[in-house]
């Protein structure tokens, strides 16, 4: 999301087309967007000015904000989690969700 460009968003069809170059498996990815997400993107658009980036950085060496910038903002808001902890939490939630859906785990 930090490297997202405005041109990737299709407001008419409520979707975000992430190009294959930014995807791990090198395949394009289509993300459906909720109405609320489109509203937030509209607010972000007004804040980013004429930048091609959704989250513009501070200059030519930093065209977009970094993940460190986001982590620092979260820390200042009292919502800081180290990356390893976030990955672990996401992984355990995925496993937990899968286990709940797996009929072999029914009692």
Image (tube, rainbow, N blue to C red):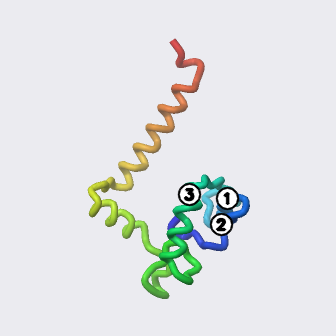
Q: Which type of secondary structure does the marked residue at label 3 adopt?
A: helix
Left or right: 106 as drawn, with respect to 66:
right
Mark 1 → mark 2, Cα distance in angstroms: 6 Å
Foreground residue, 38 or 28? 38
Q: Which residue is mark 3?
A: 37
Foreground residue, 15 or 57? 15
Please tell me which residue is depicted at 57% across the width and 18% down the height of the picture: 104
Mark 2 → mark 3, Cα distance in angstroms: 11 Å
Q: Which residue is mark 1?
A: 15
Please tell me which residue is depicted at 45% across the width and 44% down the height of the picture: 90
Mark 1 → mark 3, Cα distance in angstroms: 10 Å
Left or right: 99 as drawn, with respect to 22:
left
The relative height of residue 85 versus residue 100 in the rendered view (above or below) is below
Q: Position of residue 8 (x, y in %)?
A: 66, 68
Dot 3, how many residues are within 10 Å of its Cα: few (below 14), some (14-19), or many (20+)?
few
Dot 1, how many residues are within 10 Å of its Cα: few (below 14), some (14-19), or many (20+)?
some
Q: Residue furthest right?
A: 13
> Residue 25 falls in which quadrant of the image?
bottom right
Left or right: 16 as drawn, with respect to 63:
right
Q: Which residue is mark 2?
A: 9
Q: Are marks 1 and 2 in contact (CB under 8 Å)?
A: yes
């Amino acid at each position: 999301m930090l490297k997202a460009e405005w041109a990737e968003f299709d407001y008419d069809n409520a979707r975000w087309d992430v190009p294959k170059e930014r995807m791990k498996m090198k395949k394009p990815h289509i993300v459906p967007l909720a109405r609320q997400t489109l509203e937030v993107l509209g607010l972000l658009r007004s804040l980013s000015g004429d930048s091609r980036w959704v989250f513009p950085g501070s200059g030519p060496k930093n065209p977009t904000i970094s993940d460190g910038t986001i982590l620092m903002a979260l820390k200042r808001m009292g919502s800081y989690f180290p990356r390893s902890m976030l990955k672990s939490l996401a992984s355990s939630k995925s496993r937990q969700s899968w286990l709940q859906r797996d009929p072999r785990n029914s009692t």
